[in-house]
Amino acid sequence: MELRKGSWKIAILVCALVIYLWMLFVDHSHVLTDISQKITLQKTRVPSRSVLYQSSDRSRIEDMPPDGRTDSKKSQSLLPRNVSGTLEGGISEYQTLKQQGLLPSRQLPTALIIGVKKGGTRALLEFLRLHPAIRAAGSEVHFFDHHYVKGFRWYRRRMPPTLIGQITMEKTPSYFVTSEVPKRVKHMNPGMKLIVVVRDPVTRAISDYTQVKSKRRKMPRFEDLAFLNGSKIVDTSWMPLKIGVYVRHLERWLQYFPLSQFLFVSGERLIADPVTEVTRVQDFLGLKRVICEKHFYFNATKGFPCLLKSEDRATPHCLGKNKGRSHPYIDPMAVQRLRDFYRPFNQRFYQLAGMDFGWY
Ligand code: A3P
């Protein structure tokens, strides 16, 4: 009996020692992985459609790569497969929703605001973003002029995610005046819709000059830059003036795209009557007229139409300080000389565009 009691104690001690050694030396990472897989599966379950619009879900989806391939590969290495070969949990559900267009994914743009610099391009884009069917890149992408070598994948990654039926847009005003751009745009999408905001070329040049002057401490007078060596001859090689010869740029674009794919927006009317101009753009893009009077108010201090609320802000606000700046005094004689210079170009532009913008 005494001996039996002793051997029981030894057996219990040996068992405890074996369990202790197992805990100490055996790799338990697979057990932990199993637990983490279960947690991951629950997290990756696709939220219902109504939840997709909540900001936390949107930013999670925005982090995904455009085609979603890399992410699903990552998930595959973690997730076990069931008999039919589909991934258990939310991934197959995710793919189905994606195929049905019920999940946002990044797309290349189908409409571009191609110009012109200082025409009112930012105002137009901010107004258009009020439309639920328009999603636009926030900053200027400069793909077709500066980053073309980076390829379409790079370009698409710069676009916001969209659902089926939503239009992807971006605005880069230098596209209108850069000679290689029309060919490149056509190569990507021959059906691209092209929007050009135009403004009186003389005011536009002064606005352009004002912007450059605001960034430099010493800047020659506008009049000294606009005319060759103090003469009356217009320096057409000076970029702020070159941009304003709209007909030349349009002629180049028309070698690649028919006129029907262009919409010309009046920069002046965009300030005086934004709803009329934005309505024209909504019609051109084939969208329901959603943006209307109720979205705008006129800010007398700023002297411009502003928004009551927007995609980013729920309170009334105007565009930034660098939009709608006061211009320096320019000699009226110089202004008149420039008006005379632009007149024939403007007339040809009206004929080509099929629209009179009233700059005299
Ligand atoms: P100024 O600052 O010279 O007045 P862009 O966005 O293409 O650079 O154009 C800037 C111009 O947009 C401004 O030039 C301004 O005249 C014009 N603009 C049009 N609508 C505007 C708005 N609602 N608020 C501010 N600026 C507006």
Image: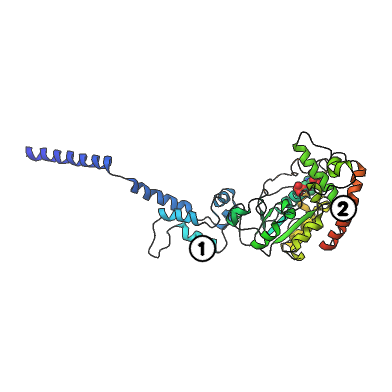
Expressed as whole percent of the image width and height from the top left, the position of residue 204 reads: 82, 48
Q: In the rendered structure, which amino acid carries the disc numbered 1?
A: Thr
Q: Earlier in the sequence, mark 2 or mark 1?
A: 1
Give the left or right position of residue 94, taking residue 126 as reference. Answer: left
Residue 342: assigned label: 2
Expressed as whole percent of the image width and height from the top left, the position of residue 323 reads: 77, 43
- Residue at 40% x, 63% y is 85
Q: Nearer the viewer, residue 31 or 227?
A: 227
Q: In the rendered structure, which amino acid carries the disc numbered 2?
A: Tyr
Question: What residue did someone put label 1 on?
Answer: 96
Distance of mark 2 from mark 1, alpha carbons?
A: 57 Å
Location of residue 178 by image quarter: bottom right
- Residue at 86% x, 41% y is 229
Task: Mark 2: give few (<14), some (14-19) or many (20+) Cα within 10 Å.
Answer: many
Q: Is mark 1 within 8 Å of ligand 1?
A: no
Q: Is residue 217 above or below residue 35?
A: above
Expressed as whole percent of the image width and height from the top left, the position of residue 37 reads: 40, 51
The secondary element bearing badge 2 is classed as helix
- Residue at 59% x, 50% y is 54
Specify whether residue 298 is in view: no
Specify whether residue 19 is in view: yes
Residue at the top extreme? 217
Give the left or right position of residue 206, taking residue 147 as reference. Answer: right
Q: Nearer the viewer, residue 224 or 190?
A: 224
